Amino acid sequence: MTRPSWHVASDAVRWRVVLAAVAVVTFAIRFVPLAASGMLGAEYGYDDGVHLSLAEHLIAGQLPYRDVLFVHPPGIVLALAPAAALARLIGDPGALAAGRLLVTAVGMLNAVLVARILRRRGLVAAATGGLAYALWGPAIAAERSIYLEPFIGLGLLIALAALARRRDGGSHPGAPVIADVGPGRDRPDRRAAAALPGRTGRATLAVAGIALGIAVTFKVWVVLDLAVVGLLVLARHGLRGAVRWVGWVLVGAVPILLPFAWAAPRAMWDDVVLAQVGRPRTAGLLHERLGALDPGNMSGTLAIVVVLVLVAIATVVVRRAAARVVRARGAGEAQSSIVVRLSSPSGWPDPAWWAIVAVVHLGALVAAPSYYLHYTAFLAPPICLLAGAVAGAVSVRVPRSRRAAVRVVGASGLVVVLAAIALTFPALPPGPREDRALLADLTRTGCTWSENPSYLLVADAQTRMIAEGCPGQPDLFGTVMTERGGYPVPGTVGPTETVVQMVERQLAASRTVLLPAGAPETWLDPALVRYVHDAFTRVATTGNIAVWQRSAS
């Protein structure tokens, strides 16, 4: 039966409203607190300073790995290059703000993609998945600053959107996600699978491959997504399609990686791979890690429970839906054909693959040597897709007579979910903000050294330091980690100079030092702290930054 044109138009309007709501909520919840608190161009952690500082070094002609150490692939450095170029016009704090705006925009795009992938499962599914991403606490933390997780999430979501099936069972939006198979289709291979999606062929494989190829240049964790999506492509498109997809992955990755690998192949391998493998373990299991970061001591447990429950529900929904199709199709040869197709990976619905991605991501978080809250944003894309798929499947099965009661239960559940999210909701750093004008004035002449490159950026000193050839390391933590692993460190003189000796040499050439107001980080050697106290005098404290200047002789 053809739906009336007015009904179709009404659905299109509602879809636009949902999409706009997801985009606005995602952007606002990330951007507005930063702008309102004056944090958009302020010091906010460590990693964002490292990433933007490396981009500024790149603009000045200094390559990661060859000239300066970096323990990740170079994708983020290239992504921030436009913001780094702006630093010469609008200053380092302005460039920092531009970089954060870029990441916020990526986060908004991720939420919109989650909703878009879920669109055919109904508006309830799209709204649930998109808003779940918008409100996922660790995703907010990662997308208020300059972290890697938003970019690798974008690559995964683009790939999943390209490979998503337009129809895999059911006769209405939001129907249970099952393979659309039946009598007369006797080959559960890539041709049967290719008949289902509606968006297959070379363009689909190209988009999915290039997206993940670019994503792997941001963080090596993407190799896990490459493995899962590669299996998906192999199941649905066969060996020839998988080989073509691998070629597109290389098209996305090689042009970004090759120039840096060509300039310093051994250093890049040591920094990106070996140093990360030797990274010291900082905490236990995922729930212990999250619990240590949250005063409520519950957020980690809730995160684990949410992941496992969503994976379990998605599995049950798919299996029950498949059983209903088998019963509806009848017995005998046709039934046997359907069972074979559903048991074959080529017939697996999209949520089955999302569940696999979620489990793989969860395993990576548990097994990772170190852990920080923004790492959990790695889980956000598959979990929010599963949440939307489950909500969509449930919503279309509620009889009209029970919908009022279900709405009450759903509203209550929403309150519980929002309360759970609040436990991991990343608040902005408390306390007074730094006086950037004071910092700029105190670092105006001579070289300035800092253990945290973000301090140099908010002081509007980083661009000048690079231009004047002042000594320093954009990532001192990574430098220490690399030395502990026994790998060469850029910036050291000769094979015997240690990182401590290198930093002492840098301090000796500096007029000003910026350190945390409380105490230096534990990974900063005590000998260096003593050197600062002996050779410098603390002249000011603003926000979280203590300013030390060289003592008069």
Image (tube, helix red, strand yellow):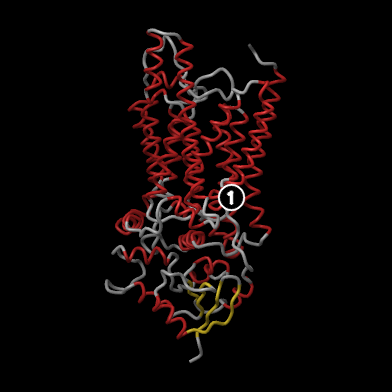
Furthest-left residue in this view? 495
Q: Which sits in the foreground, 413 or 245?
A: 413
Furthest-bottom residue in this view? 553
Q: Is residue 340 left or right of residue 169?
A: left
Decide: is 179 above or below 123: above
Furthest-right residue in this view? 6
Residue to which mark 1 is pinned:
104
| Residue 515, percent from left and from top | 51, 74
Q: Is residue 509 left or right of residue 270?
A: right
Q: Residue at x 54, y 35 (%)?
A: 387
Asked if residue 207 can be seen in this view, the reply is no
Decide: is 518 above or below 421: below
Mark 1 Cα shell of 10 Å, populated few (<14), some (14-19), many (≥20): many
Q: Is residue 250 left or right of residue 19?
A: left
Amino acid type, callout 1: Thr
Q: Which sits in the foreground, 112 or 246?
A: 112
Q: Quadrant of residue 370?
A: bottom left
Q: Residue at x 47, y 73 (%)?
A: 520
Count of numbered tags: 1
Q: Residue at x 37, y 41 (%)?
A: 250
| Residue 238, percent from left and from top | 35, 26
